[in-house]
């Protein structure tokens, strides 16, 4: 059976949690394969309950699904415990959550360095969440990181923390004029936290491949989005990992030939949190309308999202980079009530019209959107459950986005609820 990848096709916040939750009814495993608690997924159940998930895969809300925090994720032990406690207090069964033994842990010194570095950069800041994600990935690449499995061997954990603080305390004290951290306090804190989830640490790479061999379906869930990928995004205003489909194999231990379907999540307009270029960004009443009507506040950061019209240049780019087979278009209902709906079909870069993503950082910053206006619709579409029920202009909008994006739109979100989805094609790859 297939491994399915689900990724954000814009700058994140596209509604991946809703898509994962929908697919969770048809899969046996859901894997989060990269990122940390700097990302958030919101899932709204039929009874109106909404859950903001950060580290834990969205499949945790579907009975019978085994959820995995993969080796490509960086995990803050305190954040993980807090999220588990919040779910359990609301009656969610978390017993089927596993943590890869190879996932790296965000340590207190990662958070401290992240916060002071961002403040030090001033106007040149990247716009990180200050949760230690970047510094943790830096240590991973530098081969001095702490992994979940190190919680099972206090001697190794202590050696790694002491070695790390020999250097990092010098940076904190001498460069940023901050207080040095105690290795003993860091080790004791992390060990105490780890004692509450050590039973979840497993060889998830082996378990996932065994599941596929048994004919079970695995859903690989990315956080953030394509344009935040450290290799393929709007560098340097990106995250520190690979949210793109290629990162799914590296972050889970599932080989690429196992993946049969790549589902991209597209919002019916565009949003972005943090610094960096955003060609279709709106600074007028239309932008505020999208922000207010769409409830565009970061799930995790609570920062207002920047808003703009749909960008087909980005969608085409995401289709190529990820090998997208199907799109899930979310928040189409937000556009109801607009007389005209602009769509960016190309960019003007210093007088030259381009239809594909510019190669250089300079050209991306200089890109001016070229718009095509489509007629809007006034009807409330939140109760539509089939494509034919949508107003003619809404269908025309979807058809045009599909034509421009380079992959079929197989599902459409018409509201935040689990049941507020129109399914046009099977998304499970069967």
Image (spheres, rainbow, N blue to C red):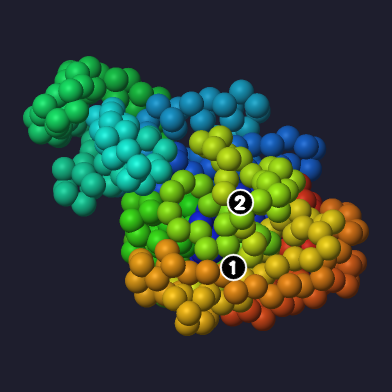
Q: Is residue 286 above or below residue 430?
A: above
| Of residues 207 and 71, the one drawn nearer to the viewer in this rendering | 71
Q: Residue at x 78, y 43 (%)?
A: 46
Residue 349 place in picture, x, y as percent: 46, 75
Compute the Cα span from label 2 to label 1: 16 Å
Q: Is residue 36 above or below residue 308?
A: above
Which quadrant holds the N terminus? bottom right
On screen, residue 311 versus residue 259, left or right, reads: right
Residue 119 place in picture, x, y as percent: 32, 33
Which quadrant holds the C terminus? bottom right
Q: Is residue 162 visible from the viewing direction of this image?
A: no
User: Nearer the viewer's eye, disc 2 or disc 1?
Assistant: 2
The kind of secondary structure element at disc 1 is: strand
Q: Residue at x 24, y 29 (%)?
A: 109
Q: Is residue 186 visible from the viewing direction of this image?
A: yes
Q: Are marks 2 and 1 in contact (CB under 8 Å)?
A: no
| Of residues 285 and 319, the one drawn nearer to the viewer in this rendering | 285
The kind of secondary structure element at disc 2 is: loop
On screen, residue 302 versus residue 331, left or right, reads: left
Q: Which residue is mark 2?
A: 283
Q: Residue at x 73, y 35 (%)?
A: 49
Residue 229 falls in image quadrant: bottom left
Residue 288 place in picture, x, y as percent: 68, 46
Chain-order first, disc 2 or disc 1: 2
Q: Which residue is mark 1?
A: 311
Classed neighbour count for the residue bearing mark 1: other residues with Cα under 10 Å, few (<14), some (14–19), many (≥20): many
């Amino acid at each position: 059976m297939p491994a399915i990848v689900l990724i954000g096709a814009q700058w994140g916040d596209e509604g991946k949690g809703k898509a994962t939750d929908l697919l969770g009814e048809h899969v046996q495993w859901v894997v989060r394969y990269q990122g940390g608690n700097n990302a958030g997924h919101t899932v709204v159940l039929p009874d109106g309950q909404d859950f903001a998930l950060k580290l834990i895969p969205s499949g945790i809300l579907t009975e019978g699904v085994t959820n995995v925090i993969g080796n490509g994720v960086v995990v803050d032990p305190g954040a993980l415990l807090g999220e588990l406690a919040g779910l359990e207090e609301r009656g969610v069964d978390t017993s089927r959550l596993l943590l890869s033994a190879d996932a790296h842990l965000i340590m207190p010194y990662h958070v401290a360095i992240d916060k002071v570095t961002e403040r030090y950069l001033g106007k040149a800041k990247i716009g990180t969440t200050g949760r230690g994600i970047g510094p943790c990935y830096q240590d991973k690449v530098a081969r001095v990181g702490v992994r979940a499995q190190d919680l099972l061997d206090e001697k190794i954990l202590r050696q790694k923390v002491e070695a790390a603080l020999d250097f990092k305390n010098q940076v904190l004290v001498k460069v940023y004029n901050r207080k040095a951290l105690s290795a003993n306090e860091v080790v004791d804190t992390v060990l105490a936290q780890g004692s509450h989830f050590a039973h979840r640490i497993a060889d998830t790479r082996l378990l996932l491949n065994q599941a596929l061999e048994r004919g079970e379906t695995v859903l690989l869930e990315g956080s953030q989005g394509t344009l935040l990928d450290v290799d393929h995004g709007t560098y340097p205003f990106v995250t520190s990992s690979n949210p793109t489909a290629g990162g799914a194999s590296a972050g889970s231990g599932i080989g690429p030939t196992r993946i049969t379907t790549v589902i991209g999540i597209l919002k019916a307009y565009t949003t972005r949190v943090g610094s960096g270029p955003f060609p279709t960004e709106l600074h007028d009443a239309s932008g505020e309308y999208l922000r207010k009507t769409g409830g565009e506040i970061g799930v995790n950061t609570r920062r207002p999202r920047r808003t703009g019209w749909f960008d087909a240049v980005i969608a085409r780019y995401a289709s190529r980079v990820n090998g997208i087979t199907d799109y899930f278009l979310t928040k189409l209902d937000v556009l109801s009530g607009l007389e005209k709906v602009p769509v960016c079909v190309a960019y003007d870069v210093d007088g030259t019209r381009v239809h594909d993503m510019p190669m250089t950082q300079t050209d991306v910053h200089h890109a001016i959107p070229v718009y095509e206006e489509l007629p809007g619709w006034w009807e409330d579409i939140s109760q539509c459950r089939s494509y034919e029920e949508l107003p003619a202009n809404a269908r025309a909008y979807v058809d045009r986005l599909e034509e421009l994006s380079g992959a079929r739109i197989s599902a459409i979100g018409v509201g935040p609820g689990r049941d507020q989805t129109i399914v046009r094609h099977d998304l499970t790859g069967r």
